[in-house]
Amino acid sequence: MQIGLFPNLQLDRSLEKQRLDKFTSLLTEGKTVFQVVENVQIQRWEKVVWNCAWNSITTLTMLDTQSWLESSADAMPMTRRLMTEVIDVARRCGVPIEYGLVDRLMDKVLAMPVPRSSMQTDCEMGRPMELDVILGTPVRKGRELGVS
């Protein structure tokens, strides 16, 4: 688990740090494995890049990631472009994500044993899908900031 401060300009930074320290002491006492990261927004947006790409693509196509990537010559470039668009939004929000993340995420998915997404499973099972949770922030922020 990775945790960190979510900046709140209404709070004193030292108070935020104090609260984080208290929380981490409880996790340590409970023998929870975790890491405190300096800028948790980086990890948050990296997960958003992954989720926006794979949850939406696998649900819309009803293919697993490998089948999607093998489906046409356009699949890989389209997936990479989708990831890049989310990185564009993150960067406009002031989160310093490198575009090299796209390569790392593509390498990761290619090394995995045919992953399926939670959204795809929810769709197949007729359950509500986490559309707003997964896609809402990047879409709203993109519109707000004029990013494709």
Image (spheres, grey):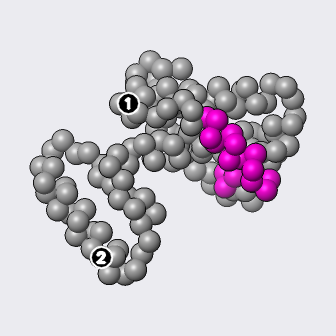
Amino acid tagged 1? Cys
Q: Which residues make up the magenta segment?
A: 102-120
Give the main secondary structure, helix, strand or loop, of the magenta stretch: helix
Identify the residue position indicated by label 2 in the image.
Answer: 26
In the depicted structure, whether residue 144 falls above or below residue 137: above
Residue under the image location 80 percent in, 48 percent down: 64
Q: Are marks 2 and 1 in contact (CB under 8 Å)?
A: no
- 117 and 15: which is toward the camera: 15
Taking 112 as reference, is 34 left or right?
left
Q: Residue at x 40, y 22 (%)?
A: 145
Distance from the alpha carbon under mark 2 to that under mark 1? 32 Å
Q: State how many labels appear.
A: 2
Kind of residue sitting beneath label 2: Leu
Foreground disc of the pair 2, 1? 2
Numbered badge on residue 93: 1
Q: Residue furthest bottom?
A: 30
Image coordinates for residue 8, horizontal then vertical, percent: 22, 45
Residue 123, image x and y in percent? 72, 52
Residue 74 disc label: none
75 is higher (above) or lower (below) than 66: above
Q: From the viewer's perspective, tell me whether residue 43 is left or right of residue 70.
A: left
Residue name at image x 44 percent, y 71 percent: 33
> What residue lies at 82% left-to-right and 45% top-to-bottom?
66
